[in-house]
Each structure stands twice: as C-alpha cells, then as structure tokens.
Image (cartoon, helix red, strand yellow):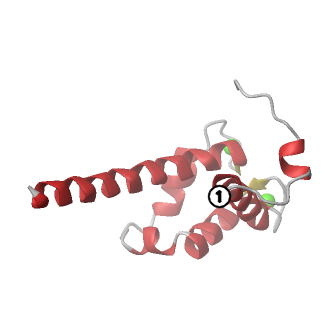
C-alpha cells in the first residue's frame, strides 16, 4: 500500500466529495452484508450471494450460470479461507467498474464516429 491513511479524512468531514462518498458507500455496503453471519468482517458464501443479488441485480440477471456465485467466490477468495474479505471484494468492484468504463468509452467513441 503506497498510501498513508489519514483518519481526519473520514472523521472531520462535513462535505465529502463524490468520490469519497462512493468509497464510503462501498465500505458500508460491504459491512452491511459481512456483518450478518459468522465473521463480521468477511462475507461467507451466503452473504456474498445476498450482496450480489441485492446490490448487483442487473449484473447477475444477464448471467445464466447457476454456479456463478460459487465461481465468483472461488475467483475472489485469493487467500483460500472460504470467505471474501474487503480486500478481495474490492477486486470484484474494480473489475466490474473497469468493464463498465470500457462499455462507456465504447459508447463515446461510437458517438464520435457518428458525428464525423
Ligand atoms: Ca460474515
Ligand atoms: Ca478470503
């Protein structure tokens, strides 16, 4: 980790920026689901499934694979403890965000071509 975390950034803050807000929401969503069962700071498979089906509804609805949650779990669980911690979870969020951005850029490029 190259950053030194500044606790002031989260404690004395009346007006978080949009990006700070997005990070805050991400953390809160993770803990909302991770705190339901077992280890409070990790998602077991049931919690992961609930998070995916509740928060990534559109993403899941276009996937037909019934084993998807198992596959995502296996893919994310890099330290092989059968739980997904926050570090592992952000990998999924980052991958999905990159995929969304690719799509977004593609749309923009097509618009540019259309305007020429
Ligand atoms: Ca848990
Ligand atoms: Ca893990």
Q: Residue 3, position in %: x, y?
A: 73, 28
What secondary structure is found at the residue carrying circle 1? Answer: helix
Q: Looking at the picture, does residue 12 appear above or below residue 59?
A: above
Query: What's the residue at 57%, 67% (across, down)?
Result: 52
Q: Is mark 1 within 8 Å of ligand 1?
A: no
Image quarter (top left, top right, bottom left or bottom right) of the N terminus: top right
Task: Out of 16 and 102, give the one closest to the viewer.
Answer: 16
The crowd level at tag 1 (other Cα within 10 Å; few <14, some 14-19, many 20+) is: few
Kindly identify the residue that appears in the image at 65 percent across and 61 percent down: 45
Q: Which residue is mark 1?
A: 18
**In the image, 28: left or right of 12?**
left
Residue 23 at x, y percent in the picture = 69, 53
Q: Quadrant of residue 46?
A: bottom right
Quarter where residue 4 is shown: top right
Q: Position of residue 7 (x, y in %)?
A: 89, 41
- Most distant residue in the top direction: 2
């Amino acid at each position: 980790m190259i950053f030194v975390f500044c606790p002031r950034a989260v404690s004395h803050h009346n007006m978080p920026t949009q990006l700070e807000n997005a990070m805050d929401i991400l953390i809160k969503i993770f803990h909302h689901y991770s705190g339901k069962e077992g280890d409070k700071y990790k998602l077991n498979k049931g919690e992961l499934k609930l998070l995916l089906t509740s928060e990534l509804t559109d993403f899941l609805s276009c996937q037909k694979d019934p084993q998807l949650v198992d596959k995502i779990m296996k893919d994310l669980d890099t330290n092989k403890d059968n739980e997904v911690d926050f570090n592992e979870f952000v990998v999924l969020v980052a991958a999905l965000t990159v995929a969304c951005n690719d799509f977004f850029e593609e749309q923009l490029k097509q618009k540019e071509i259309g305007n020429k």
